[in-house]
Image (tube, rainbow, N blue to C red):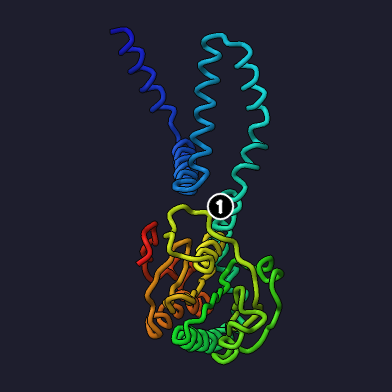
Amino acid sequence: MDFLTNAWDTFISLIKSFQVTDALDIILVSFILYNAIKLVRETRAEQLIKGLLILCVVWAAAFYLQLYMVSNILSYIFQFGVIAIIVLFQPEIRRALEQLGRRGIGSKYWSLGNFSKNSEEVEKRCRTCIQAAVDAASELQRLKMGALIVFEMQTKLGDIIDSGTVINAEPSAQMISNIFFNKAPLHDGAMVIRDGMIYAAGCILPLTKSDKVSVSLGTRHRAAIGMSEVSDAVVVVVSEETGQISLARHGVLARNFTKDTLKSELEKLILSQYAGQKTAGEGKSKKFPTIRKGKKK
């Protein structure tokens, strides 16, 4: 009975001392933990976190059972835990910072400020480029020639561009088709579109490390998914084997696009950032179906 009374008195004292700043503190911590869990869920980091939790349990058990040697070894390991976490979670930390930069409070105003003077010109150029890319993808689909076209969004792809050849040319369906012609020097790589211009070709993209990608997908599709995982880029893929047109966005691949549906989807995803009508997060017009493991049909 005394225990319940003391617990009740403690609870009442906490309620009386509770302030608005405490509520704000709880909300911020909850938000950070929620996004941290969301970030590492279904990634390699999830398994690493499980391993760290197991080490913590072993360290607590060793300390309780007075296993001095095990306890000391684990203590030395945890002393360098911060550095180890930075090394182990480097891809996840980089992705989190990129997402924060894209979705931060000032990202909308920064983006609008960059294009305020020439937004109409850039939007017109992007419309022309989208039409050229769609026409080229349709022609390559007919010829069953592979293509990999990356539309740069807010995340700049300078490191990807450096791996290829800078072109910086006006877009046209003929030029895009010629670049991906299977005898052309730059066909074996990705094309990067920046602000409605064919900026570079023959670029090397990072492959996805997800184990949920269908085994029937080749390197070109895995590169498209990988590029969309590490940036907010929109990636169009034309399969060399089947001629099927796919689109990767935020680590998810959608397939079976036609000429009309591809044009509509690209306009919804790309033109909004130049028109200033939507934020990058609102630019997603639909949730793509995830491509999972399966036998090739």
Q: Vertically, is 280 above or below 74? A: below
Q: Vertically, is 205 above or below 138? A: above
> 10 Å neighbourhood of mark 1: few (<14), some, or many (≥20)?
some
The residue at 47%/35% (across/down) is: 22
- Report the quarter where the C terminus lies: bottom left
- Report the quarter where the N terminus lies: top left
Residue type at the position of mark 1? Ala
Q: Vertically, is 79 above or below 134? A: above
Q: Is residue 160 left or right of residue 44?
A: right
Q: Depth check: 229 or 38 in front?
A: 229
User: x, y percentage for residue 208?
Assistant: 53, 58
The residue at 60%/74% (across/down) is: 190
Q: Which residue is mark 1?
A: 96
User: x, y percentage for residue 277?
Assistant: 46, 76
SS for callout 1:
helix
Q: Depth check: 193 or 210 in front?
A: 210
User: x, y percentage for residue 50?
Assistant: 48, 34
The residue at 49%/67% (across/down) is: 221
User: x, y percentage for residue 122?
Assistant: 58, 84
Q: Vertically, is 101 above or below 185? A: above
Q: Which quadrant would residue 2 be assigned to in this image? A: top left
